[in-house]
Image (tube, grey):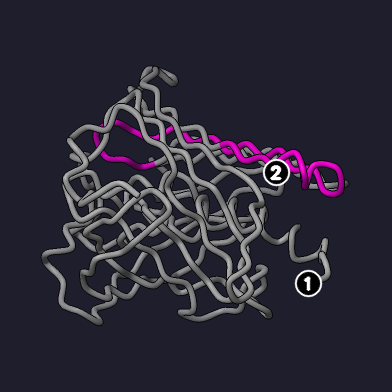
Amino acid sequence: MRFDLYKMKKIFEAASIFLLCSISLPPGDSDEFCGISNSTFLPGETITYKAYYAVGSLYFAGGEAVLNIKKEDLHGNGVYHIVATGKSNSFLDRMFKVRDRYQTYIDTGTLKPYKFIRDIHEGGFKKFQNVDFIKSANTAVTSAGVFNVPPCVQDVLSSIFYARNIDFDKYHEDDKIPFSMFLDDQVYAMYIRYMGKEIIKTRYGLFRAIKFRPLLIRGTIFEGGEKMTVWVSDDANHIPLRVESPVSVGKISADLMQYQNLRYPLTALISRR
């Protein structure tokens, strides 16, 4: 099969979008969820993922993404400082080097973000964005101006950890869970569709998993709609296990490969590969 640099470029872009956007699926601004408390993670947690592109039985590794959590103080507020880094592998570096870094500072009590920083370097493209969320005014402040946002709006990174605290047992298969997200100076009203529970085989092992599909933002490398599927561990941790989506030719997936310092034992793991 002829090597296609464009497809390989998309592998790593998918690692960032999968793990920093598409699985960032917070509940909406209803009273049931606004200010939900954390019961799933602790400072010190680190999770590593690898992204792959597949056509038929052929797989190509593209990059790696890492999420880690620290507890800090920001302007007198106790926060979880969450950092997500993404990088292309050495093979792809020679043609399309990627070094991305996302940061969010979220309140330890409500899990609402105070600050979001996006610093991406993808080939010759660079972008830096700083967002300050002013909770008392329900605004987000960026270099482009001041934007009104819903009370429980999340950024693309904070929402991953907010979503992990969803009690999926409250939902029925095919239910929609609404959420709002601030991205690139816009508020998006979106949802995820709960698809139930199943056993999934990943590159790490066999897991009991919770399955859902997000409504994607049209205009990314993916089409809009519910074409992406996400699986999280069916235990108290709710860590993302796999994200998968079709592309124009083949599919892209990102799999959990390593974890440290989870709050609870990973009881969703049935067996290692």
Foreground disc of the pair 2, 1: 1
Residue at coordinates 28% horizontally, 56% vertically from top-left? 206
Q: Which residue is mark 1?
A: 1
- Neighbours of disc 2 within 10 Å: few (<14), some (14-19), many (20+): many
Residue 85 occupies which quadrant of the picture? top right
Where is residue 143? Give x, y as percent.
70, 42
Residue at coordinates 17% horizontally, 50% vertically from top-left? 235
Residue at coordinates 54% horizontally, 48% vertically from top-left? 50
Where is residue 245? Give x, y as percent.
52, 71
- Determine whether, in the image, residue 38 is placed left or right of residue 161: left
Judged from the image, the secondary structure of the residue bearing numbered disc 1 is loop
Q: Amino acid at mark 2?
A: Ser
Judged from the image, the secondary structure of the residue bearing numbered disc 2 is strand
Q: Is residue 267 above or below residue 150?
A: above
Nearer-the-camera pick, 111 or 216: 216
Q: Which residue is mark 2?
A: 88
Q: Amino acid at mark 1?
A: Met
Q: Which residues are magenta?
A: 85-112
- Determine whether, in the image, residue 252 is placed left or right of residue 260: right
Where is residue 226? Give x, y as percent.
45, 79
